[in-house]
Amino acid sequence: MFETLPDWFWILYYLFIITTFVTSILNAVRKRKKLLSIFAAFITLITPFLSFLYAIGRGDGLNEWEYIGIGLQAGSLWAMTVTAAHLVTVAWWFFFFSKFNTEVKS
């Protein structure tokens, strides 16, 4: 049997993914940071799929984080791609909450 991360982690992870997707789509529709919003929505959609494809290759006794960590240490392109996709979704929130939000008018 494969090890996996606890259920609470997956609930928070998918809430984060869904919230990121919804906010990026809303910003694209409202024409705020439109290109960035569309890019974030696209990356948010493919990130869980990429993560799943990468995690298929893990062996017994490793959860997803351990496997990505080992892949990063080994210089795996897949591990770097999955990590970069997650970093883009996190970066979206920095841009979303930044002072440079086009909604704010002086």
Image (tube, rainbow, N blue to C red):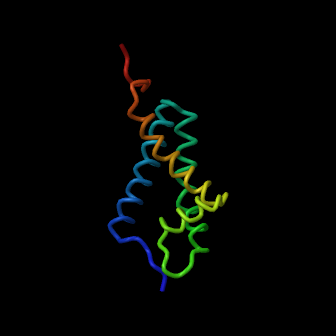
Question: 60 or 5: which is nearer to us?
Answer: 60
Relative to 70, is 105 on the left or the right?
A: left
Residue 45, given in percent of the width and then of the height, sits at 54, 54
Residue 29, given in percent of the width and then of the height, sits at 49, 36
Residue 13, given in percent of the width and then of the height, sits at 40, 59
Please identify the quadrant where the C terminus is shown.
Answer: top left
Q: Residue at x 42, y 35 (%)?
A: 96
Q: Residue at x 54, y 63 (%)?
A: 68
Q: In which quarter of the image is residue 73?
A: bottom right
Relative to 41, is 74 on the left or the right?
A: right
Q: Which residue lies furthest to the left in this view?
A: 8
Question: What is the number of callouts on the image?
Answer: 0
Q: Residue furthest front?
A: 73
Above/below status of 99 relative to 52:
above
Q: Residue furthest top?
A: 106
Residue 26, given in percent of the width and then of the height, sits at 44, 40
Q: Residue furthest bottom?
A: 1
Above/below status of 1 relative to 7:
below
Q: Which residue is drawn at 36% across and 64% down?
A: 9
Question: 65 or 95: which is nearer to us?
Answer: 65
Above/below status of 91 relative to 54:
above
